[in-house]
Image (cartoon, grey):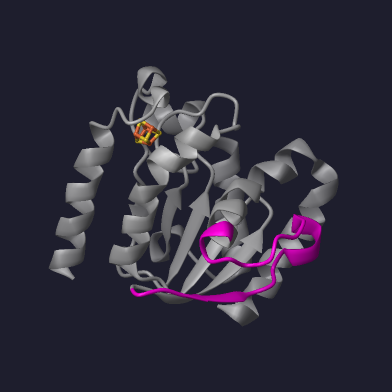
Amino acid sequence: MVQIKTDLLKLKEHVENCKKCDLWKGRNKAVFGEGDENAEVMLIGLGPGYNEDQQGRPFVGAAGKLLDKLLALAGLKREEVYIANVIKSYLPDNKPKKEQIAACTPYLDKQVEIIKPKTIVLLGNVAVKYVFEKFKLPKAPMRDIHVKPFSVASLFLKAKVIPMYHPAAALRNPGLRSTIEEDWEKIKDVL
Ligand code: SF4
């Protein structure tokens, strides 16, 4: 357990000093990720917006408050899970470029390798696309795959991955909110 903490802290230091893609120039604070290093459930979102960049923490502000409520619907507290993002530096337009994803995801891969979660909840299309391509899962639109568990395995990991709408989608499109809330109630049975 101490080793997990040490490995994550070392990786965090790399991220905080990282200049591997152009996003470092607009960064105030890198958002490495946070939560229980021994969590069985890991959440992967997109990347830091303005509030996350100011605080250096994932999912703060309106999307963070909503995420806390959604976690509660699944019977979870924020401190019981680990939350990370595909992109670690401020992403002003929520649209990471291919080369930014390629530069940053080795950090995410390493986080997953260290934490070894049993379940990975993929929040939004970018996280789904990255993980589905990595594990060669069939491509499908979110409306067809949300809240469905898929099994993945590698040398370092054996887990379920569950695609979910990003909480910010409910803020942008209030019509989606009830679907997203129902998904989080359903996920309780899968976790
Ligand atoms: S987004 Fe990732 S790869 Fe790009 S500078 Fe930040 S930490 Fe490095």
Q: Would you say 112 lies left or right of 49 here?
A: left
Q: Quadrant of the C terminus?
A: bottom right
Ligand 1 image-quadrant field: top left
Q: Residue furthest right?
A: 175
Of residues 171 and 166, the one drawn nearer to the viewer in this rendering: 166
* Residue 123 spot, x, y in % from top left: 59, 53
Q: Is residue 89 above or below residue 135?
A: above
Q: Residue furthest top?
A: 25
Residue depicted at x 19% and y 60%: 5
Q: Quadrant of the N terminus?
A: bottom left
Q: For residue 182: magenta? A: no
Residue numbers of the magenta segment: 133-155
Q: Would you say 24 lies left or right of 51 here?
A: left
Q: Is residue 157 above or below residue 14?
A: below
Q: Would you say 175 lies left or right of 56 here?
A: right
* Residue 68 spot, x, y in % from top left: 55, 54
Q: Is residue 139 above or below residue 13?
A: below
